[in-house]
Image: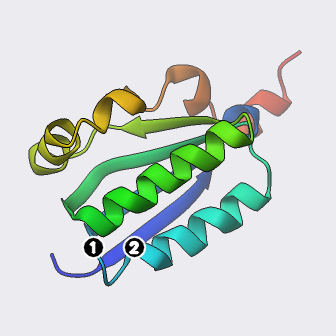
């Protein structure tokens, strides 16, 4: 798959999931960064970057992930990465970047609850 796309989805507790698909490379890194900054401007307590459909990640994309991590730390926001493909995980591992992120296999259960389903609970 050539190209890049992302989907933004609200989660429980005001968290936001940003699902990335395709190739996060030099051509698309700053588009991703702009969209993520729009999400961050809403001040969510947690941003989940879902890398499962990401097929390729280069140093430009990696730099944007690290910039997102710096902004999250500065703003006391939780930033989660959902593990990506073997190729993406390999790049994160060989660059020793993986250890700087909170990484999960799935979106945590407490965040997967649809916001509408929480409204009726007391």
Is 85 situated left or right of 111 in this image?
left
Q: Are marks 1 and 2 in contact (CB under 8 Å)?
A: yes
Binning the other alpha carbons within 10 Å of mark 2 as few (below 14), some (14 to 19) or many (20 upward) gives many
Image quarter in which the C terminus is found: top right
Q: Quick one: quadrant of the N terminus? A: bottom left
Residue pointed to by mark 1: 25
Left or right: residue 82 versus residue 23 is right
Residue 11 coordinates in the image, percent (x, y)? 64, 41
Q: Quick check: 116 left or right of 9?
A: right
How many angstroms separate mark 1 from mark 2 (CA)? 6 Å
At a point 38% along the width and 59% down the height, the residue shown is: 63
- The residue sitting at 52% across, 69% down in the picture is 33
Toward the viewer: 79 or 63?
Answer: 63
Res 55 → quadrant: bottom left
Task: List the residue tagged with mark 2.
Answer: 29
Q: Quick one: SS at disc 2?
A: helix
Q: Residues within 10 Å of mark 1 (few under 14, many from 20)?
A: many
Q: Residue at x 41, y 39 (%)?
A: 81
Q: Quadrant of residue 35?
A: bottom right
């Amino acid at each position: 798959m050539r190209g890049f796309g992302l989907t933004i989805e609200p989660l429980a507790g005001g968290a936001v999931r940003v699902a990335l698909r395709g190739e996060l490379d030099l051509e698309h890194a700053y588009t991703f960064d702009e969209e993520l900054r729009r999400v961050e401007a809403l001040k969510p307590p947690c941003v989940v970057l879902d890398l499962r459909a990401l097929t390729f990640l280069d140093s430009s994309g990696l730099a944007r992930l690290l910039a997102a991590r710096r902004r999250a730390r500065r703003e006391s926001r939780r930033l989660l990465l959902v593990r990506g493909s073997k190729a993406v995980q390999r790049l994160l591992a060989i660059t020793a970047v993986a250890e700087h992120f909170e990484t999960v296999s799935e979106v945590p259960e407490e965040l997967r609850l649809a916001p509408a389903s929480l409204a009726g609970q007391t």
